[in-house]
Image (cartoon, rainbow, N blue to C red):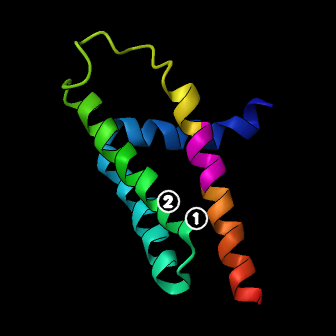
Amino acid sequence: MEILLLPLSAIGHLFIIAPFAALIPAGIFSWLYIKSSKWSCLATALLWFIYTLYEFGMYTRILCSGECNIRIDLLLIYPLLLLTSLWAIVSFIRHIIK
């Protein structure tokens, strides 16, 4: 089971260390929205953009007083981003198939 979680964990660490890396999925889903006009892609792009701002606030200690070693918030945020991303990808693929 740990081997399956390793890639997700590595991606999560990347976003914590370099918060602006989360602009990459935001840009991809923005591009998918432009190509398909699917609102699921737009909603996902907006969520990724909001997450980028949130993570930057945590990185610069604006939203955190300094003791942010245990990030319980990510237990809610990462599954939300993962599910909405999968939803947008499936929606885009269904748009292409039609």
Q: Is residue 97 positioned above or below 48 on the image?
A: below
Type of secondary structure dominating the magenta stretch: helix
Q: Residues within 10 Å of mark 1 (few under 14, many from 20)?
A: many
Left or right of 59 on screen, residue 9 = right
- Picture coordinates of residue 30, whole percent (x, y): 43, 71
Assign the N terminus to one quadrant of the image.
top right
Q: State the SS at label 1.
A: helix
The residue that mark 2 highlights is: 43
CA gap between label 2 and label 1 equals 5 Å
The residue identified by callout 1 is 40
Numbered badge on residue 19: none
Asked where in the image residue 98 lies, by quadrant, the reply is: bottom right
| Observer-nearest of 35 and 72 | 35
Q: Which residue occupies the foreground of this view, 97 or 59?
A: 97
Q: Position of residue 23 (x, y in %)?
A: 36, 58
The segment highlighted magenta reads 79-84
Residue 44 at what x, y percent from top left? 51, 58
Judge the density around disc 2: few (<14), some (14-19), many (≥20) Cα neighbours within 10 Å: some
Q: Look at 26% across and 18% down and name the residue there.
A: 64
Q: Amino acid at mark 1?
A: Ser
Q: Amino acid at mark 2?
A: Ala
Residue found at the very far front of the displayed protein: 39
